[in-house]
Image (cartoon, rainbow, N blue to C red):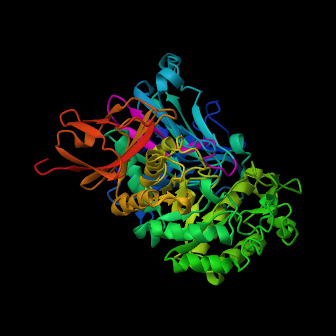
Amino acid sequence: MRSTSLDWGLVIDLPDDGPAAISGQPIVEVLAAGFGRAHVSQRNVRTAIGAGMRVAGTSADRDGVHVDQRDEQTGLRSRVSFRSAGGVAACQVRTTVTNDGAEPILLLGVTSLALGLPPVAALDLLAGDSEWIGEGRWTRRRLRDDLVPDLSLPLHGQDGRGRVAQVGTGTWSTGTHLPAGALVDRDSGAAWLWQIEHNGPWRWETGERLGGAYLALLGPTDLDHQWQQRLEPGESFTTVPVSVAMSGDGFDAAVAAMTAHRRALRRPHPADRTLPVVFNDYMNTLMGDPTTAKLRPLIDAAAAAGAEVFCVDAGWYDNDTAWWDSVGEWQPSQTRFPGGLEEVVARIRDRGMVPGLWLEPEVIGVRSPMQDKLPPEAFLQRGGVRLVEHGRYHLDLRHPAAVAHLDEVVDRLVDQLGVGYVKLDYNIDPGAGTDLGAAGLGNGSVGAGLLGHNRAHLDWLDRVLDRHPELILENCASGGMRADYALLARMQLQSTSDQQDWRRYPPIAVAAPLSVLPEQAASWAYPQPEMSAEEAAFTLVTGLMGRLYLSGRVDGMSERQQRNVRDAVTAYRKIRSDLAQAAPAWPHGLPGWDDAWLSLALNAPGVTYLALWRRDGAATTTLHLDHLRGRPIELDVLFPLHLPAWTHAWDAAGGTLTVTAAGDEPYAARLFRITPTEGSR
């Protein structure tokens, strides 16, 4: 049997009389009407077409390594393409299937990648649940004990038929579960971490085979998402991309590899080098009610605190108080800004900051003047009726009129108003999709219509940045409801949540680097004049271990309180150049929603930054810093600078740090810098 090894260690077997496979699992699985599965189940493996594939060849070019196969019965040809950055133990994969036969083929599901894994008994599954204001709640569970029963499969001589699956539906790609997960071998330390890079529906699944576990990664499917794709002879379909990282040194090492891989995926942007401090007027501050009078002192105070971008959030287009279902024209309010929005933008620029505005481009309110200026075909529909969700219609970006409208809005704000930062929000989910124009894609498949819109959305973003290469784009969807790397490969930062309770935010911020780059993860820091000094420091630390995202009534603070905010900005400026090189680790393990102590470490070359939050727990906690085991260290407080010091004890042999909080306030936090000292190995 031949095989090919990818640069980062994955081995693909290339048999002469069977399909290309990884550890016994064919890398391509195709469900199609008229062919189905070779082994009945509701899994997306053991498909008839997948089993019928035969290797036609391999090749390599600037786009990666390609494995070509063909199924003689259907005439379906497949190409799986693996692309990785040099020196990174991770790979992006997608599959293209082409109908070389004489008859149409109706696709019902195509894997981006499937692969085999070690036996189930030693595997742990790590997965994340998510919902509005409760994003990124990861758990670690034993696959055998908790999820996959021992069914004595060798006795029966068959693969299992059950599966453990996570599914994302609609367009909130991270709104229920995360399109990411990991399997870790407790015995060997080997770990596999994956992500599905799609701004729409997806599915990942794992389960037991006779030869071990398997993993299948897919975009939309017929069973989950009402997706079908009719392939006429000569036509092709390409799956959504997925990425897999692999390490033999445990979960944190796999996360480090995926972190480096995510950096390689991103579209280059000037803001990636500067990582500017953003102040946004919304969270626990103006809350969608900006006016010139309210913004003037806030702009001045934000600039004095060290902000480099000032974003006017929702409400700037509103002439009354009921704007939710009237949005879509995106013209500045005349009542909120008597001197024009230009006056506010000029003040932001005069204070040395980049002006920003909030925008929700994909929706048109049911009372908006735009709702009857665009043709009906420019909206997502079902059965000839426009879809309505929470008082909004949803644009279909496959239609040129919808695209032309959005291009006019963005170009006007950038070229005429001088906006350099746009927060792209997204507060509705249209469900399974649209059947408008989908008949040719397979019997009116609403899932195919939605996939076409999803891809058109990405194309629109690419063209926006082609026209405005300096424009900074923030990704937001009611916080973190659409935080996938289809979007984050294009946009510069990601809002992690809409959580308004500063006590509840730390587990969201701590979990964010599991699925979002640290330098993209923007967690709100919203100190208030009524907060104690420890409480203000607590919320500021929440923003410091990612892209600092300030809000709060800084204009109403005392000089001492304002100094505290300036200290936080100074601390961020000290560490931000390292953020873009850092790999995250979790000294307390995965964060729990109600944990009394939470921690996040960012390991950069020669230095570790450690954030530690106490939430009404015991005064002392112990953390594991295995990467510093056996090394003497220096530990410095970066923030806050004017509050009681916490004591610490370092056990170099065990790699443990014991920290004791000072004072009796139940909620407190610190940001530390840890440096190995001279003479350490």
Question: Looking at this view, is 36 or 672 the one in front?
Answer: 672
Which residue is found at the position 24% from the left and 55% from the top?
606
Q: Position of residue 342 (x, y in %)?
A: 66, 80
Residue 638 shows in the view: yes
Extent of the magenta region = 170-194
Q: Quarter of the image for the N terminus: give it.
A: top left
> Residue at position x 49%, y 41% from top?
507
Image height of 671 relative to 375, above or below: above
Residue drawn at x 55%, y 60% as measured from the top left: 556
Q: Is residue 544 above or below residue 589?
A: below
Asked if residue 670 lies left or right of residue 356, the reply is left
**In the rendered image, is residue 411 in sight?**
no
Q: Quadrant of residue 41?
A: top right
In-front residue for pair 678/259: 678
Which residue appears farthest toward the left when viewing the image?
A: 679
* Quadrant position of residue 161: top right
Q: Position of residue 502 (x, y in %)?
A: 53, 45
Q: Residue 505: within the magenta?
A: no
Residue 291 point in image, percent of width and height: 69, 68
Whole-percent x, y for residue 591 in the image: 46, 37
